[in-house]
Image (cartoon, rainbow, N blue to C red):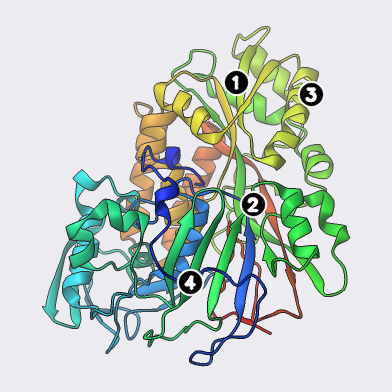
């Protein structure tokens, strides 16, 4: 999710992102005047700018987090709870009938160039997502949309191809953009975004910082409570920790687990359970992994508890289903992979496999690198030889997309787009990933998975949807073509006496919506 390669988009980001004009950070959090907001919030983010900011296509964790402040949808998700709430719309979309909804725009809403947000902008924003030529990341989340039209300047009507009970919250994946600006120069917009949110974009440099400032004309429910924000892009975890402890920044994400006990007093650290997972993905077109028993054996051979205790210092939970046990749509899978070397060996023997040897690719994310030798050690105990190949995510996914890989262990977290089981399951098991990445397309299991997800999507009864999602969970767990090993906790640290209203997130990134300087 953190890199463009996650969807094959190749937006180039350069130092040219820096916008002309606009104030720079004063760097000291000094109080400034302006509409009830004061001071500068400075934060340490883990990842550089791997994509641009266009909300239709961005998959980078850092620009996506920035977009939560720059843009609005008709409906947005609360950053901490992931519960849907009205944003540009005056309320949640109104259901006219099973396949028709209407939404009314907030009166007086404007984009950061001062122009009014109109129903035409809303229609444009949805249509560009639905247009296949644009290869929008968000299109896969709204396959139920048929047409979007403006009823008048402030009312939009949605016609659905079929009934989809999660429609009111799902449209949060589409952020509303100004038709005039995007239509004139989409590439320029990608580098210098213009939204209607509480903060407006000022400048960005790929491996340095992003600067935003309060949008004075914002009239929505979540106005900026700081005059300015400076997000320092700090991939070095020790640099982030030092920046918080020295007072240079007021919050950091992705605290190294080993450093968590070092935060005391006014410096608080909290580890929040997330959907964020470490998964194993197999090249099912490779004859070594075509038999699901081989894939199952590699899961049973893993000492997941040791991975969590040693590398993550207890900050994760072993996967007992596709979503963590804390998730409202949790269903325990019929197949739960406990550490069972004897069972792993038997599965390999039953599959006729001897002396299994392959290359395990991993991304170079810090905690993933910490886990890598422990995975190799677990498999070695079961007589499995895995050579480790650790590299940056874009490089690894380039191999995956060419089909030149054996097994991949990597992090993933589509919950930043939405937290319902339909969205989370579709990300890895419907469309791009199974068809383009792990070679599941022709299997009967994939066809059944698609059918179950489609049936769940059109089911009006919540209990029926959950029953169908449970069947999908059982199926993907048994198949193990791509399946989680663990769901990790996300540690965030902040200085309690400098921020008001701050909460750590269950997703990658930081949110300062409704957060001010103390």
Q: Which residue is mark 1?
A: 294
Q: Which residue is mark 4?
A: 23
- State the residue at coordinates (61%, 46%): 277
Q: Which residue is mark 2?
A: 234
Residue 482, given in percent of the width and then of the height, sits at 52, 35
Q: Please report contact status of discs 3 and 2: CB closer than 8 Å, yes or no.
A: no
Q: Nearer the viewer, residue 248 or 11?
A: 248
Q: Earlier in the sequence, mark 3 or mark 2?
A: 2
> Please, what secondary structure does the residue beneath circle 2 have?
loop
> Please, what secondary structure does the residue beneath circle 4 have?
loop
Q: Which residue is mark 3?
A: 377
Q: Nearer the viewer, mark 3 or mark 4?
A: 4
- State the residue at coordinates (19%, 51%): 131
Q: Nearer the viewer, residue 491 or 481?
A: 491
Q: Which mark is residue 268?
A: none
In whole angstroms, how far apart are the C-alphas of marks 1 and 2? 40 Å
Residue 507 visible within the image:
no
Q: Nearer the viewer, mark 1 or mark 3?
A: 3
């Amino acid at each position: 999710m953190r890199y463009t390669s996650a969807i094959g988009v190749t937006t180039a980001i350069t130092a040219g992102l820096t916008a002309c004009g606009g104030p720079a950070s004063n760097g000291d959090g000094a109080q400034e005047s302006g509409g009830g907001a004061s001071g500068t919030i400075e934060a340490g983010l883990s990842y550089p700018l791997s994509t641009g900011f266009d909300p239709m296509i961005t998959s980078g964790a850092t620009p996506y987090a920035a977009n939560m402040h720059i843009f609005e949808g008709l409906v947005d998700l609360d950053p901490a709870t992931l519960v849907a709430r009205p944003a540009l719309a005056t309320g949640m979309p109104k259901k006219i009938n099973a396949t028709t909804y209407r939404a009314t725009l907030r009166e007086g809403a404007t984009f950061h160039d001062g122009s009014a947000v109109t129903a035409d902008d809303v229609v444009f924003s949805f249509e560009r997502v639905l247009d296949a030529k644009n290869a929008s990341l968000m299109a896969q989340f709204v396959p139920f949309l048929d047409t979007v039209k403006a009823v008048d300047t402030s009312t939009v009507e949605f016609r659905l191809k079929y009934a989809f009970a999660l429609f009111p919250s799902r449209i949060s994946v589409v952020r509303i953009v100004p038709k005039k600006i995007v239509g004139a120069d989409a590439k320029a917009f990608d580098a210098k975004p213009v939204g209607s949110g509480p903060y407006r974009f000022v400048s960005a440099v790929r491996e340095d910082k992003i600067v935003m400032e309060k949008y004075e004309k914002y009239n929505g429910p979540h106005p900026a409570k700081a005059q300015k924000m400076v997000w320092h892009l700090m991939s070095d975890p020790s640099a982030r920790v030092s920046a918080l402890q020295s007072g240079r920044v007021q919050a950091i994400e992705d605290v190294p687990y080993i450093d968590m006990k070092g935060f005391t007093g006014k410096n608080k650290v909290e580890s929040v359970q997330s959907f964020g997972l470490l998964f194993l993905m197999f090249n099912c077109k490779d004859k070594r992994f075509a038999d699901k028993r081989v894939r199952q054996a590699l899961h049973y051979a893993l000492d997941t508890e040791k991975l969590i205790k040693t590398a993550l210092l207890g900050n994760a939970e072993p996967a007992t289903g596709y979503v963590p046990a804390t998730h409202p749509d949790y269903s325990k899978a019929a197949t739960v992979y406990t550490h069972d070397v004897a069972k792993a060996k038997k599965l390999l023997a039953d599959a006729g496999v001897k002396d299994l040897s392959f290359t395990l690719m991993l991304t170079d994310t810090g905690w993933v690198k910490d886990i890598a030798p422990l995975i190799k050690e677990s498999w070695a105990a079961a007589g499995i030889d895995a050579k480790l190949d650790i590299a940056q995510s874009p490089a690894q996914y380039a191999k995956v997309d060419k089909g030149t890989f054996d097994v991949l262990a990597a992090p993933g977290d589509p919950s930043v787009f939405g937290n319902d089981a339909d969205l989370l399951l579709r990300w890895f098991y419907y469309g791009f990933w199974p068809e383009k990445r792990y070679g599941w397309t022709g299997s009967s299991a994939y066809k059944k998975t698609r059918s179950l997800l489609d049936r769940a999507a059109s089911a009006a009864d919540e209990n029926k949807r959950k029953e169908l999602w449970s069947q999908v969970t059982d199926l993907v767990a048994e198949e193990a073509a791509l399946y989680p090993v663990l769901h990790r906790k996300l540690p965030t640290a902040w200085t309690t006496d400098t921020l008001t209203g701050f909460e750590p997130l269950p997703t990658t990134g930081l949110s300062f919506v409704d957060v001010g300087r103390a």
